[in-house]
Image: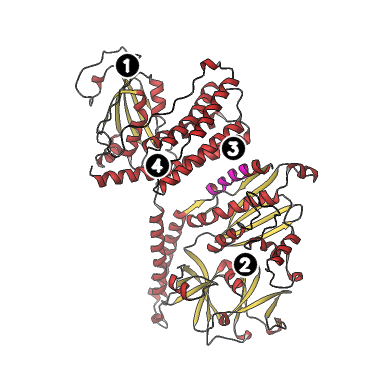
Amino acid sequence: MNKKGLDDAVDSMLEMFIFETNQNLEQLEQITIQSEKNGAFSGEEINDIFRIMHTIKGSSAMMEALEVTALAHAIEDIFFYVREKKPEKLDCSTLTDLVLNAADFIKTEIDKMEAGEKADAVAADLIEATRTFLLQLKQINGEQPDKITLPAKPKPIQEPIEEPPKKPTSYIELDEPVNVFQARITYKDNCEMENIRAYTLINNVKGIVGELHYLPDNILEDDESANIIRKDGFKVCFTTSKEYDEVSALLNRTIFLKELELEQLTDVTECSYWPKKEVLPKKVLPEKMIHKVEDREISHPSMISVNVTKLDILMDLVGELVISEAMVTENPDLQGLDLDNFYKAARQLKKISNELQDGVMSIRMVPLSGTFQKMNRIVRDMSKKLHKQAELVLVGEETEVDKNVIEHISDPLMHLIRNSLDHGIELPEERERLGKNPVGKITLEANNAGNEVIINIVDDGQGLNKEKILKKARENQLLYKNESDFTDKEIYSFIFAPGLSTNEKVTEFSGRGVGMDVVMKNINAVGGNIVVNSEPGKGSMITLKIPLTLAIITGMTIKVGHSRYTIPIMSIRESFKPSLDNILVDPNGNEMIMVRGKCYSIVRLHQIYKIAGAVTNFADGIMIMVETEKTTIGLFADQLIGQQQIVVKPIPAYIKNISKTQGITGCTLLGDGSISLILDAMGIVNRF
């Protein structure tokens, strides 16, 4: 293999290592936190954690992240002892802390490697704490100190990964009779990079083998070896002092294992690819033992991992297809022509393109479960530091949204959960005094509502203090009308203003007036909005309304003069022809409209965007009521053109640099080739 090929192989190995390790760490965190809630580690959970740490230990050693290897090995030793000895006395809380601290360390090192940096942090303190815990665990469960031996740190791998040996051969001193084993490993379909996985397996067994040979014998030098393994399996033959059960247990822990055929031989001559040389003495064995592991996921659908960049490209192409279809079917040159066959074909094209769009969208959809589960860690850690008791209840975590949306809402959810626990949930003694359960409850709930997802964060704490929020808003000069005119929801929405905090003391978690404004910024970035409800002494509920996807949305196109704008359907509450009887004007000249007994401000789009030739008489135009988390306003336009699927394009940077674009979130291309700006209701409210 030339240097470029080797570099590509190493890059592929690193990418797979990062992906699999991050998945393992997420699973590790969920299992550990659930075990702590249950007050004990079940046998299955112990096995899962042992398997995860063993996997991380082996793969990190292969990637030469030796501090990660040593730490994973130390945690693995604890769970090996717990699994084998089943100690009666086990401090689950301390063990949980050790595991989560180790997971944090490993995650930090993985992030460094992903950024192209060297994983160079030292885990000595964590390893020492882990070894001390194991020592104490053995002591309190009755083992004599002189029988206690601390596990040794794993030795670094000697062979550099850039120059792997053609036939890795390692020798150990065999104090027991030599056993000979032959194995054939088959990997799961579509797992990819079978040759790299075979190399990982070789590294995992090095510590127990005497002499080792395998086919194909050029797993890193020749990329074709992956196809050979895919077709014929990976064949390994080695000598060892270990017995059949130990060898079987080790090989069965192979990642993406589909099938294992393991056979104990009487001597190496029975192996067809063992080099011809001196023969070991024959052993008398029982009948040949063959252990076969059937595919454990045969009833599940096949899975394949795809780079998100490829999905983004596919989504962009589908967007271009939607635009092109509109440009063909809505071409002005077709007006007035009798084209029945054309429109019949156009309807079929639209049906197919809609199905294609839905299919691509479904591929990009991922469940919220991964994001929701991460909140368990935040609640656990904060509860300990704040000396509070709280439980997190997850509802509707199987709800799916676009992957890009998930990336935007992870931080907002974290801030909102932290805020509920810090500001909302009271101390246990205070809750008992109020007649509440000393354990506070935070509910994180998601459900689908048409083209958007509704996420509620509900707590049973003390609720928001309306007077305090109003006082801070007054001090920060945020009031834009008379205090008596503000509704409760409008007052509560001030908590998202930059620099506003009702905490008197600055703590690790709050008091600086930052965080909640980040929530608002991120949610606005995906075209969503936030509504806050609260009842003093009972708790609070923050509702996030988020679009399912960012790429293609349903919008209402409107006309203002010779210009056209598009408003996302999810922002529109209603539209109607305004009656002059319902129009009011205050002494300052501000126009308002009465709708079912409530008064709303009016924004004339032709005025704020300086459009000539627009309708100015209310009776001749259309009023579109749009709502945000702050308020509802009426947008006055000339007419509605129609509802359609639009492809969201960002505003070019050079336009942002020369023009004030507040109130405009993007642009789209209409069927006749003209450009329509996409209006942002929240931006218009702020600008107005």
By secondary structure, the bulk of the magenta-drawn segment is best described as helix
Residue 628 numbered tag: 2
Residue type, numbered disc 3: Gln
Give x and y (percent) for residue 412: 58, 55
- Is disc 4 surrounded by few (<14), some (14 to 19) or many (20+) residues within 10 Å? many
Residue type, numbered disc 1: Val
Q: CA–CA distance between discs 4 and 1?
A: 34 Å
Helix, strand or loop status at disc 2: loop
The magenta span reads 370-381
Can you identify the residue that label 1 sits on?
Answer: 178
Residue 17 numbered tag: 4
Magenta span has 396? no
Q: CA–CA distance between discs 2 and 3?
A: 38 Å
Helix, strand or loop status at disc 3: helix
Residue type, numbered disc 2: Thr
- Is disc 2 surrounded by few (<14), some (14 to 19) or many (20+) residues within 10 Å? some
